[in-house]
Image (cartoon, grey):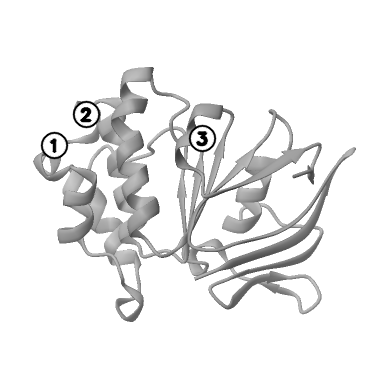
Amino acid sequence: MSFDIDVVCSRGDFELAVAFQAGPGLTVLFGPSGAGKTSILNMIAGVLKPTRGRIAADGQVLFDSATRTDLKPEHRRVGYIFQDARLFPHLSVEQNLLYGYKLAPEAGRYAAPDHIIPLLGIGHLLERRPLSLSGGEQQRVAIGRAILASPRLLLMDEPLASLDDARKQEILPYIERLRDGLKIPILYVTHARAEVDRLAAAVIRIEGGKVVA
């Protein structure tokens, strides 16, 4: 699977203009706050509309201003993981995970609960509710829910930023497992150089709304 973006997005005095490609593995979007990294993820996910350009994933066009193509977010098959887990508090861990699994078209499923649950080490949490979990456990469940939807690509927006150092060290090995085990592009936003050095197969540096390296 591969991913391609070439877009411009103007918001007030700020213009974001980026073009890059990513293949399977983990690509880090790295740069200072306000550079436009999260806006890039939001355009890919379909919650922010580019002014013009094209976005394609796994051979399908998600957005193209020239042909007026603009798939709705729920039709893009893009997994999105935020700083906070955003789990459904009234559902058990197992129900949260199966919610993601049921979202995936049956013919397009490549991730199964009996593979992803052990991969993330969350089998012992299945009967618990999200509010009873630690921050690291919640984030692993959120990652599992996103993966079980069998996305074309996975977006991770500073997924460790809200965690203390101990919880970060807990989750990093699981992200490495996903990077090495999944055959999809993962776009990972971070400010932390240690995460870049440990996780990145490729790095795209964003400054002032532009790709600079």
Q: Where on the picture, by quarter, is residue 150?
A: bottom left
The label shown at residue 116 is: none
Q: Quadrant of the C terminus?
A: top right
Q: Position of residue 204 (x, y in %)?
A: 66, 46
Q: How many marks?
A: 3
4 to the left or right of 119: right
Q: Where on the picture, by quarter, is residue 175?
A: top left
In the rendered view, would you say 18 is above or below 152? above
Along the line of sight, the residue nearer the viewer: 64 or 17: 17
> Do the residues under discs 3 and 2 have CB atoms within 8 angstroms?
no
The residue to which callout 1 is attached is 128
Observer able to see residue 171: yes
Amino acid at dot 1? Arg
Residue plotted at (47% across, 50% down): 80
Q: Residues within 10 Å of mark 2 (few under 14, many from 20)?
A: some
Question: Which one is in front in this view, the residue at disc 1 or the one at disc 3?
Answer: 3
Q: Position of residue 122 (x, y in %)?
A: 17, 42
> Do the residues under discs 1 and 3 have CB atoms within 8 angstroms?
no
Question: Which one is in front in this view, the residue at disc 3 or the one at disc 2?
Answer: 3
The label shown at residue 197 is: 3
Residue plotted at (51% across, 35% down): 197
The label shown at residue 133 is: 2
Q: Residues within 10 Å of mark 1 (few under 14, many from 20)?
A: some
Spatial CA span between label 1 and label 3: 34 Å
Amino acid at dot 3? Asp
Q: Residue farthest to the right? A: 13
Return the disc, 3 or 2, that comes first in the chain's sequence. Answer: 2
Q: Where on the picture, by quarter, is residue 4?
A: bottom right
